[in-house]
Image (tube, rainbow, N blue to C red):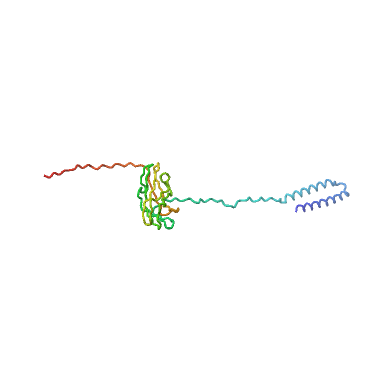
């Protein structure tokens, strides 16, 4: 559009110059150079006005790329729950093998044991399955306080037929530090399967001083004399 306007103005200027040149031949008093200078100034002013009125193209900035991906907060998987094994809870075992806890023969739960002391924990259990336990069956460690000398298993000392009861034992040495400790064990087949109820032990390691009680009064025997 601007180019078109400039062309029109240029054409007009040429026409004016031609007319003025013709006039110059007939009129001696007018100086054509002065008139041309005035016309050039007018044309320059017109061009400047047109340039000011014509809007210039403004570059549109490219939009800033914004990541549309949401921030992902990792969800912890898994916090492993801890559970305290309890007697009498049956777990799935190998077909034909099962065991039931009957009693704590030694070291009842939370018994007081002196620090760094060797002792034997014995459980009474019953073969409630349909297979006979051989001497290759064993009591095996699961968690907590390990056996003395880091023992993790104890074999049966005899065969146990279905329905029979047997006492199984594990050797321990109490820790040197006072506190409450636990140990969890379970029966284990000759072919490598855990079975039956879990067997647990809880001990309190420490020392205690007995508080003396008032001694009983000594009663002097009386003698009755029969005349």
Counting from the top left corner in percent of width and height, residue 79 is at 48, 50
The one of 66 and 122 positioned closer to us in this rendering: 122
x, y percentage for residue 226?
12, 45
Between residues 85 and 24, which one lies in front from this camera angle?
85
Residue 215, picture quadrant: top left
Residue located farthest toward the left when viewing the structure as drawn: 227
Left or right of residue 22, residue 99 in this image: left
Whole-percent x, y for residue 3 in the image: 77, 52
Q: Quadrant of the C terminus?
A: top left
Task: Count the numbered circles shown.
Answer: 0
- Quarter of the image with the N terminus is bottom right
Q: How far from the left and from the top, in percent, is residue 54? A: 72, 51
Q: Is residue 139 above or below residue 213?
A: below
Q: Nearer the viewer, residue 4 or 160?
A: 160
Which of these two is toward me, 32 or 71?
A: 71
Q: Is residue 181 above or below residue 133?
A: above
Question: In the shown orientation, is residue 219 left or right of residue 185?
Answer: left
């Amino acid at each position: 559009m601007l180019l078109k306007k400039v062309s029109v103005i240029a054409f007009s200027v040429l026409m004016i110059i031609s007319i003025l040149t013709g006039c110059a031949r007939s009129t001696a008093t007018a100086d054509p150079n002065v008139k041309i200078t005035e016309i050039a100034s007018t044309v320059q002013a017109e061009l400047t006005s047109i340039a000011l009125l014509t809007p210039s193209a403004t570059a549109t900035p490219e939009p800033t790329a914004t990541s549309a991906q949401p921030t992902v907060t990792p969800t912890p998987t898994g916090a492993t729950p801890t559970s305290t094994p309890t007697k009498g809870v049956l777990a799935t075992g190998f077909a034909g093998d099962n065991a039931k806890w009957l009693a704590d023969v030694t070291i009842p739960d939370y018994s007081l044991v002196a620090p760094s002391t060797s002792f034997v924990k014995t459980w009474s259990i019953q073969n409630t399955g349909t297979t006979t336990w051989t001497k290759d069956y064993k009591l095996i460690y699961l968690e907590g306080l390990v056996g003395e000398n880091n023992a993790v298993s104890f074999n049966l000392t005899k065969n146990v037929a279905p329905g029979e009861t047997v006492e199984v034992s594990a050797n321990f040495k109490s820790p040197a530090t006072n506190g409450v400790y636990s140990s969890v064990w379970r029966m284990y087949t000759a072919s490598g399967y855990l079975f039956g109820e879990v067997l647990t032990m809880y001990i309190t390691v420490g020392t205690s001083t007995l508080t003396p009680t008032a001694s009983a009064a000594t009663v002097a025997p009386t003698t009755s004399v029969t005349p």
